[in-house]
Amino acid sequence: MDLFGVTMELSGNTVICSSSNHTLNSKGGGCPWEVSDKARLCRFLCYGSEGDVYTAREEGRVSMEGAGALLSLLQEGRGTEVVEEIKRFTQDERAVRLSPCFFALALCSQHSELKTRQAAFKAFKEVCRDPAHLFSVIQYKKELKESMKCGIWGRSLRKAVSDWYNEQDAMSLAVAVTKCKQREGWSHQDLLRLSHTKPTNEAIAVISKYVTKGWKEVQAAYADKENSEEVVKVLLYLEVVEKVKHSCDETVVINLIEEHKLERAQLLTDHLKSKQVWRALLKEMPLQSVLGILGKMTSNKILEPGSSETRAVCERIQSETALKKAKIHPFSILLASENYKRGQGYQGKTKWEPDSSILKAMDFAFYKSFVNVEPVDKRFVVAVDVSTSLSSVVPGTSVSTAVAAAAITMIYARTEPDTHVLAYSEGALIPCSVSPDMTLAQTTAELVKIPAGSTDCTLPVTWATENGKAVDVFIVLTNNPVWTCTISPVQSLKKHRQMSGANSKLLMCGLTSIGHAIADTEDRGLLSICGFDLGALCVIRNIAQDLI
């Protein structure tokens, strides 16, 4: 059989495909597609739910009730395997949000099996990359203490926390403890005291004393000492932070910000009332943070039309080097641009007149940032069903569903060489002429010019099967509130897998949905996305690479 350009041979109960490394079970229609505990764990670590629905912008507190697979794996003695997955999801940027990973690490660190606890505590430094992460894990441990009926500040936790501080680069730690002083009800003073941390070098000792005793104690202890170069650098930096804290002189504060690259979190609230202080902060502020406050800066006249500050911000936004360094995703720029264009904050209190030069810079940056999208080298079909209704917007954003669908389509058309774009039209699908060199406006116009109908999520799969196209990932984008199916999505996927030899997945994205999924399935290649955000693209990437 050669319909798909692959040679297929029947052998017993299997279909062996020469174009793939996979041996597929013809009865099941693919590789083992059942949702195993490991698959549920990976979903949980990715977006905080073991289910087959990802809801954009959902920020619920993680709890034991939603971690059934995690508990099962721990009971089976697979705790070290769980810890390895936690490390992978945090270090390889697979997680949409990190709180599920912190919860899982906290749970592993309190498990009855010694190997699991040891692996979890050893992973603290790798998983907790800044103080906020560490505070979050400690808080989850405290919350778990009630149900686990055990204390948290045993020898192992004391050592893990002590090691976290002692193994940091001294200057990096000095910056960290002055930027993020407390979170989740915990402070550095709490952690250093409860862990009985004994600094392993003099520079860390300076920081420890500063946190627990204050600057005056540090001055008294080190004023007359002959200090190492590293200790001198730390002392000078802490002195600068203290000077800023006690200064009311705007010029002094600005000079210290510019000379020592101080950040907003290290300043007092009163300092942030000054336009000149904000202008100084903007020079070195991370680009992602700049994009998030453009409206506020315009509203407060910190960025004014034609000003040197506005020109400098526009240059940074358009800089390919800055975009690459910050790893800004085009969808992230689109969200910021549409919000800025709106001229009003979500609460309606802050209003501004969008600056045309900033809008132009963001439009330029949108196209330049596609270099930051790393291809997964899979075969994609993106099927789009959107209306032109201006009232139809992606929840929690200022982006219309038509523009969102166009941007998502562009991401795959520009970065994945083997991508087919289809549009729904009166119960059928027709190929859409979306090319990599098209603009966002051109792509949007191309997608919405076709009359839309009901969204049958199985049509793209049927189209690929009937046209001999082997597809790895089907993405259906719609602003219809209800899905329709002529046949079961699972059955259509199974048929395509069997006929093409592909490990096909189907992602159904309801751009205006706030929690509705097509159905619960036991096929790990089928997932629903409700709403859309940057995290949804992370979920699609993970499922395309068989990571969830």
Image (cartoon, rainbow, N blue to C red):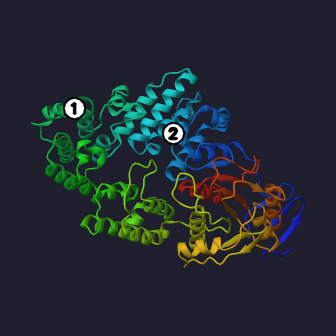
Pick out the residue farthest to the top. 149
**Mark 1 residue crowding within 10 angstroms, few (<14) / some (14–19) / many (20+):** few
Looking at marks 1 and 2 on the same chain, the residue that comes earlier in the sequence is marked by 2
Viewer-proximal residue, 153 or 336? Answer: 336
Write down the quadrant of residue 488 in the picture.
bottom right
Write down the quadrant of residue 545 in the picture.
bottom right
Secondary element under disc 1, as helix, strand or loop, is: loop
* Pointer 2 residue: 102
Residue at x-position 77% and y-position 52%: 32
Residue at x-position 19% and y-position 55%: 259
Residue type, numbered disc 1: Gly
On the image, the x and y values in percent for residue 5 come to: 78, 76
Q: Point out the image quarter for the N terminus.
A: bottom right
On the image, the x and y values in percent for residue 244 come to: 19, 44
Residue at x-position 61% and y-position 53%: 531
Pick out the residue farthest to the right. 12
* Pointer 1 residue: 214
Decide if residue 119 is in sight here.
no
Instruction: Tell me the CA gap for discs 1 and 2.
Output: 30 Å
| 272 lies left or right of 102 | left
Decide if residue 297 is in sight here.
yes
